[in-house]
Image: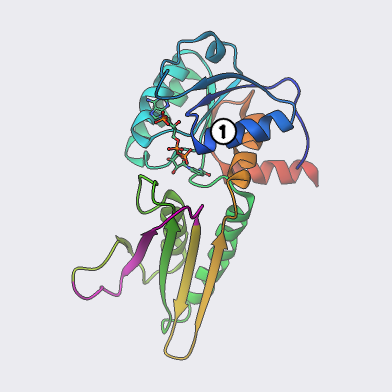
Amino acid sequence: MTQSNATLRLALIGYGKMGKEVERVAIDRGIEITARVDIDAPSLSVEGVRTADVAIHFALPPTVLNHVEELAKLHKSIVVGTTGWQSDRERIQSLVRSSGIGLVHASNFSLGVNVFYRILKEAGLLFDRFADYDVSVHEIHHKDKVDSPSGTAVSIANVLLSTIKRKREILAGSPDGKIRPEQLQVSSGRIGSVVGTHSVRFDSAADSIEIVHTAKNRTGFALGAVIAAEWIKDKQGMYTFDEVLEDVFNQKR
Ligand SMILES: NC(=O)c1ccc[n+]([C@@H]2O[C@H](COP(=O)([O-])OP(=O)(O)OC[C@H]3O[C@@H](n4cnc5c(N)ncnc54)[C@H](OP(=O)(O)O)[C@@H]3O)[C@@H](O)[C@H]2O)c1
């Protein structure tokens, strides 16, 4: 996916580790960055945001709702990479609908993780038939990550809950005593500078299978977010990155 888009203008909302990586990937593709907004200069009412086609948001979870509200008023489509805002989902959905903007969101914009979800869906459907197997999710991230469990781990857990009928609820963290059979444990580790590792273990008395995704750097997330920005530019409505990829791949067939 090396197509470039010379006409796209991007505003970066959040200029931390991800904002800077998105900038690098976007410039490589010939895209113009018109604004870099972070906590030192948090206003979205700047010329650079007004002249952008799309805003890419990688900031802090509590900023998402206000920023979507402001961007909707400016009629700017948005790619939301920030995680941890699901409690505001309904409000955001109605803002997108009433303003006629486009929004793409994903807890993980890497192409590899989106393939990982599909592999896990198949695995979940298979293990649904074999009640001897238990399943758990574990994620590890760098020590500065603010939300826990990761949005990606929650997405993985939802794939497993939708395919393995005997698992009905997420248990985030450690059980207070014995874990109940219908609970799916999602545990987290925080250490050093780990970019993001997610593993799913299926375990029986006879054997176990572990499926692991390891992010090597932030480039994959940034490339996915930029592909999403190119795609949403002239569209309306709220989409997942999975829907974007499906459309991009279908167009290439
Ligand atoms: N979906 C994905 O694929 C994916 C991948 C990686 C990360 N993420 C998520 O993306 C988010 C950011 O991650 P990161 O690693 O880039 O974090 P980070 O390095 O801490 O960057 C966060 C940025 O947001 C800025 N910010 C904070 N409050 C703001 C405000 N009110 N207005 C504008 N900017 C504000 C921060 O400014 P200061 O530095 O000045 O505080 C910082 O530049 C997290 O939620 C993370 O979980 C998602």
Identify the residue at horizontal 46%, vertical 18% (top origin).
Answer: 72
Looking at the image, what colour scheme do you see? rainbow
Q: Position of residue 55 (x, y in %)?
A: 54, 24
Identify the residue at horizontal 59%, vertical 11% (top origin).
Answer: 51
Amino acid type, callout 1: Lys
Q: Out of 191 and 244, give the one closest to the viewer.
A: 191
Residue 187 falls within the magenta-colored stretch: yes
The stretch in magenta equals 177-196
Which quadrant of the picture is home to ligand 1? top left
Q: Is residue 104 left or right of residue 166?
A: right
Tell me if residue 247 comes above or below residue 122 in the rendering. Answer: above
Q: Residues within 10 Å of mark 1 (few under 14, many from 20)?
A: some
- Ligand 1 closer than 8 Å to label 1 CB: yes
Q: Quadrant of the N terminus?
A: top right
Q: Is residue 134 left or right of residue 52?
A: left
Which residue has dot 1 on it?
20
Splitting the image into 4 quarters, where does residue 139 fall?
bottom left
Tell me if residue 150 comes above or below residue 93 in the rendering. Answer: below
Q: Position of residue 159 (x, y in %)?
A: 47, 59
